[in-house]
Image (spheres, rainbow, N blue to C red):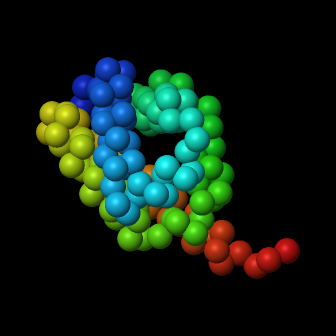
Amino acid sequence: MTDPILSEQDFARVIPAFYARVRDDEILGPIFNNAIQDWPHHLEKLQAFWSSVMMASGRYKGQPMVAHLRHVADMTGDNFGHWLLLWGETTSDLLGAEAADAMQHKAMKIAESLQLGVQFHREKPAQ
């Protein structure tokens, strides 16, 4: 399978649309709205993240695991599943099928990795 054609413009459309849905969602909205203070800055960071993940642009310079561990109480399997559902809907609505599928697949892998990191953190003995 060849890589789907994605552009910075795709991320600039998908990320704000997706997080608008998240912010309005009755389950995820309170979690994200309490966690994020500067939405414009956060959306720029997320666009850089997805550009780096999907296009190897190197734009993202953060540590997503560290950022997510600050909110470990909200990092449940159900919440990840709901996030993935909204992500799938948004990417399907805004992208071609191949690009949407690639972003959905990558999101599932990222969610799996974050969940494993959270589980490790929860099971780590207190020091």
Q: Position of residue 34 (x, y in %)?
A: 55, 53
Side of 70 where 91 appears, left or right: left
Residue 121, x across and y down, in percent: 66, 69
Question: Which residue: 55% across, 30% down?
Answer: 41
Along the horizontal axis of the image, is 74 left or right of 110? Answer: right
Is residue 8 visible in the rendered image? The answer is yes
* Residue 1 appears in view: no
Which quarter of the image is occupied by the N terminus?
top left
Image quarter hosting the C terminus: bottom right
Asked where in the image residue 8 lies, by quadrant, the reply is top left
Residue 125 vertical position relative to residue 32 in the rendered view, above or below = below
For image coordinates 16% across by 40% down, the residue present is 93
Q: Nearer the viewer, residue 98 or 69?
A: 69
The x, y position of residue 118, in whole percent, is 58, 66
* Picture coordinates of residue 88, whole percent (x, y): 24, 50
Image point 65% across, 52% down: which residue? Answer: 66
Left or right, 113 with respect to 29, comes to: right
Which residue occupies the foreground of this view, 62 or 14?
14
Q: Residue at x 51, y 65 (%)?
A: 75
